[in-house]
Image (tube, rainbow, N blue to C red):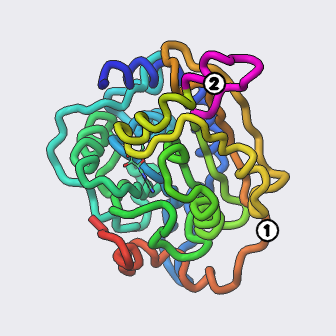
């Protein structure tokens, strides 16, 4: 399984490097923070279903951090290193000269992912204070409106119970102008790949049972493109992934949050990690 995921990550590493570079270079280098605050605040990135942290190498590589940089070569598996410290509570402290200007908040319902995530963090040299972990579900995010500059969602839409609700939640927490990065496996086309199309439908019940409700026949792109918050702002590509059979083809891209910033969000901004919001309805680590 670990080997399979390493091969999978290697095969999409180039695409991830490009998409993460596009996303991260669009973020503010540090936002103003509370009125009167002397120090700029890091940009806020929410990663849904962060799992063991296979995307952490791409954040580290983008900001040039030391550590095992799978994302900077043909690798990028994000598999576990030997770190032993615990995942931060994610205080959104102001920037210091050495820290990347990015606070990552990982949300995942599975508490067993947490230590693997910490190991991945240590392996790629991402600062502990710049990663927090919240136990929760993406369909009910314990975060204020318009509190995130970016959302990342990779291989999660296949598993969630309610895709429409998840998209509403992403739209709610993203500030207007913020971006959603998505990479998802999707269904084969009947005309182009009839054997795979039949196989995905035949094996989906077993896959859901064995792989945490993972659907083989979903195509999330039409729902993303049709969502009022993202309509007209989606750049996506469809592609096959070498070395995987059932979870191919894929769809990936960046969707820009449209619309105006709700006035009420101004007051809540910057306080959502330090102010205890992450505890409502979920467990903040
Ligand atoms: C296939 S793994 C993908 C992990 C990682 N994002 C990646 O790209 O490899 C799916 C992850 O989504 C999490 N997950 C499942 N249902 C979820 C939900 N409703 N909300 C948020 N995360 C969920 C699982 O616990 C798991 O960590």
Residue 128 against residue 206 in the figure, above or below: below
N-terminal-most mark, 2 or 1: 2
Nearer to the camera, 154 or 105: 154
Q: What x and y, as percent, mark residue 68? A: 32, 27
Q: Quadrant of the C terminus?
A: bottom left
Asked whether residue 13 appears in the rendered view, the answer is no
* Element assignment for label 1: loop
Residue at x 34%, y 76% (from the top left corner): 279
Does residue 1 belong to the magenta stretch? Answer: no
Asked whether residue 200 appears in the rendered view, the answer is yes
Q: What x and y, as percent, mark residue 246? A: 51, 23
Outermost residue on the left side: it is 84
Q: Which residue is mark 2?
A: 197
Q: Which residue is mark 1?
A: 259
Residue at x 42%, y 25% (from the top left corner): 76
Residue at x 37%, y 20% (from the top left corner): 4
Say whether residue 104 is left or right of residue 178. left
Q: Residues within 10 Å of mark 2 (few under 14, many from 20)?
A: some
Residue 222 against residue 195 in the figure, above or below: below
Q: Quadrant of the N terminus?
A: top left
Outermost residue on the right side: it is 232
Read off the magenta span: 185-199
Q: CA distance from mark 2 to mark 1?
A: 37 Å
């Amino acid at each position: 399984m670990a080997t399979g995921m390493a091969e999978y990550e290697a095969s999409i590493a180039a695409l991830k490097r490009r998409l993460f570079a596009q996303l991260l270079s669009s973020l503010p280098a540090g936002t103003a923070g509370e009125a009167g605050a002397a120090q700029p605040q890091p940009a806020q990135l929410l990663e849904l279903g962060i799992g063991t942290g296979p995307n952490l190498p791409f954040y580290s590589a983008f900001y040039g951090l030391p550590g095992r940089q799978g994302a900077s070569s043909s690798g990028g598996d994000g598999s576990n290193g030997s770190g032993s410290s615990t995942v931060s509570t994610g205080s959104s402290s102001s920037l210091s000269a050495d820290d990347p200007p990015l606070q990552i908040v990982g949300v995942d319902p599975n508490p067993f992912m947490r230590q693997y995530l910490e190991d991945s963090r240590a392996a790629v040299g991402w600062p502990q204070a710049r990663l927090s972990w919240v136990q929760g579900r993406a369909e009910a995010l314990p975060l204020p409106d318009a509190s995130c500059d970016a959302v990342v969602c990779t291989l999660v839409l296949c598993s969630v119970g309610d895709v429409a609700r998840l998209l509403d939640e992403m739209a709610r927490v993203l500030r207007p102008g913020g971006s959603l990065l998505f990479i998802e496996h999707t269904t084969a086309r009947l005309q182009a790949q009839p054997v795979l199309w039949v196989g995905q439908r035949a094996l989906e019940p077993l896959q859901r049972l064995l792989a945490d409700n993972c659907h083989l026949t979903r195509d999330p792109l039409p729902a993303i493109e049709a969502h009022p918050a993202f309509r007209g702002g989606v750049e996506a590509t469809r592609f096959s992934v070498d070395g995987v059979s059932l979870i191919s083809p894929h769809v990936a891209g960046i969707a820009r949050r449209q619309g105006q910033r709700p006035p009420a969000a101004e007051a809540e901004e910057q306080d959502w990690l330090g102010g205890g919001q992450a505890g409502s309805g979920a467990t903040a680590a």
